[in-house]
Image (cartoon, rainbow, N blue to C red):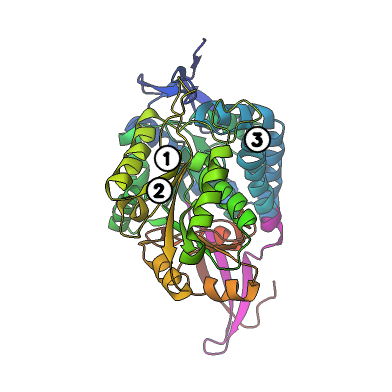
Amino acid sequence: MSIEQHDTVYVDGTFMPALTEIRMPVVDPATGNVIAQVPACGVEDVDRAVAAARSAFDRGPWPTMSPAARADTLTRLADALGARTTAIAETVIREAGFASRFAEPVHVTRAIDFVRYYADLARKEPFEEVRPSALAQADVVVRRCPVGVVSVLVPWNIPLLGALSKIAPALAAGCTVIYKPSPETPQIAYRLAEAVHEAGFPPGVVNILPADLEGSQRMSTHPDVDMVAFTGSTDVGRKIALACATDFRRYSLELGGNAAAIILEDAPVESVAAGLTMTGLALNNGEACIAQRRILAPRSRYDEIVSVLAAAANSLQVGDPTHPDTVIGPMITEAHRDRVLDYIHGAIDEGAVIAAGGGIPDDCHDGYYLQPTVLAQMTNDMRAVREEIFGPVVCVIPYDTVEEAISIARDTEYGLSSSVWTNDLNRAEEIARQLRVGSVYVNGKQTLDPSIPFGGFGHSGVGRELGPEGLAEYSETQAVFMPSPYRNI
């Protein structure tokens, strides 16, 4: 098998040789084979990229271009990505191990939707308005200015979605960007760089390079970076927040989750089984921060719900992600698979019962596969329930009253998402309003809509992505007091 060799980075509007001579291997999680080598960029490469972004922001045309002109370039980017849809989807499957049935519609097409949304929003959004100030006897021009140079750091489980949920609004706002992909999925970033180059951004506006740990840390601490936009673990997010606080650098953090799915007495068991096996187990191979993992079931229906969830989990096809019948592909690395197995074994030691799965499939001899797993007889104080497993595992917890279910759902440091399952939509909304989470999905209506804000409470992050709220993250506000009367915008 040939190994794809990447020796360049995309900086200052061109593909140029990386300054580092060190290379990182890229592994296909379905086979365990090395499929590519990419530069392990350190401080020197990052400094060069930041210098290009700084120059493009301070002296280039991008921040001062009209929003409509920036939108035109973003539209060209969306078109260039659209022309590469198949190639990008194939890369997602090979690098991340996601099933082919999800790769194109979720990881590619939806990501392109983000770009088109922010292109359209940039054309419509008022970046300036005039407000009268009676006290100052002035007309005040209130401007939304681009925040500046933005470092974008994205994990392997949403390699293009995560990147464009940040890059698109940052560019629409007039910022310049340095983007570092995850070491596990860097080739997708090269596909993005090709599309960026074709779209014709001014030099230095978008810079893309893989990096090692030291290079990644430099992107969060460089004095010429004005903002860090990060998706990943809560532990790393905390370190970024501390590093940014030292220099009062802006940051946006989309971090971990530990979603609770509250099943009410009247919920149809068939829709619950289908919905929660998808959103709790199959979505991204279970490697998703919004996965509905804590299943809160009424005690009167507990055995029934465990039984149907187990049957549904056992029906999910695990295997080669390129096969059209596959629903769950491999975990991203062997170490991550073993970490998920450790959670399962720890739960058993604490008294849990395996209702489905629990191990490595017998017919998957290569790669990092794991059976979709349903754990029963769980309580909210178990480690597998308290922490983010990030794999195809759900924990079913019994409750006696709805008030108890709400209390269990709220008993977590995370606050990214939850769901409510019932035929009574008014009751569902009432419960949703009592949950301290960024998104509540009623009866499985779970999606990332580019027009709807996404983010979390508590340890699930700071700020919001998507929607007009996502655009606002990349702006500073300036008030210019002009003698009255001045003008109307």
The first of marks 1 and 2 along the sequence is 1
Query: In the rendered structure, are the residues bearing label 1 and label 2 in contact, judged by CB atoms less than 8 Å apart?
Result: yes
Judged from this view, the residue extending furthest toward the bottom is 135
Label of residue 387 in the image = none
- The quadrant in which residue 123 appears is bottom right
How far across and down, in percent of the image, does residue 291 sit? 50, 50
From this viewpoint, is residue 486 visible?
yes
Q: Nearer the viewer, residue 426 or 65?
A: 426
- Residue type at the position of mark 1: Val
How far across and down, in percent of the image, does residue 203 sit? 56, 36
Residue located 67% across and 35% down the image: 81
Label 3 SS? helix
Q: Nearer the viewer, residue 189 or 399?
A: 399
Label 2 SS? loop
- Residue type at the position of mark 2: Val
* Side (left or right) of 78 relative to 193: right
Q: CA distance from mark 1 to mark 2?
A: 7 Å
Q: Nearer the viewer, residue 453 or 415?
A: 415
Residue of label 2: 225
Residue 113 drawn above or below residue 31: below
Classify 10 Å Cα crowding around label 2: few (below 14), some (14-19), many (20 and above): many
Query: In the rendered structure, are the residues bearing label 3 and label 1 in contact, judged by CB atoms less than 8 Å apart?
Result: no
The first of marks 3 and 1 along the sequence is 1
Q: CA distance from mark 3 to mark 2?
A: 38 Å
- In magenta segment, residue 122: yes
- The quadrant in which residue 401 appears is bottom left
Magenta-tinted stretch? 120-148
From this viewpoint, is residue 84 visible?
no
Q: Nearer the viewer, mark 3 or mark 1?
A: 3
Classify 10 Å Cα crowding around label 1: few (below 14), some (14-19), many (20 and above): many
Residue of label 3: 101
Residue of label 1: 50
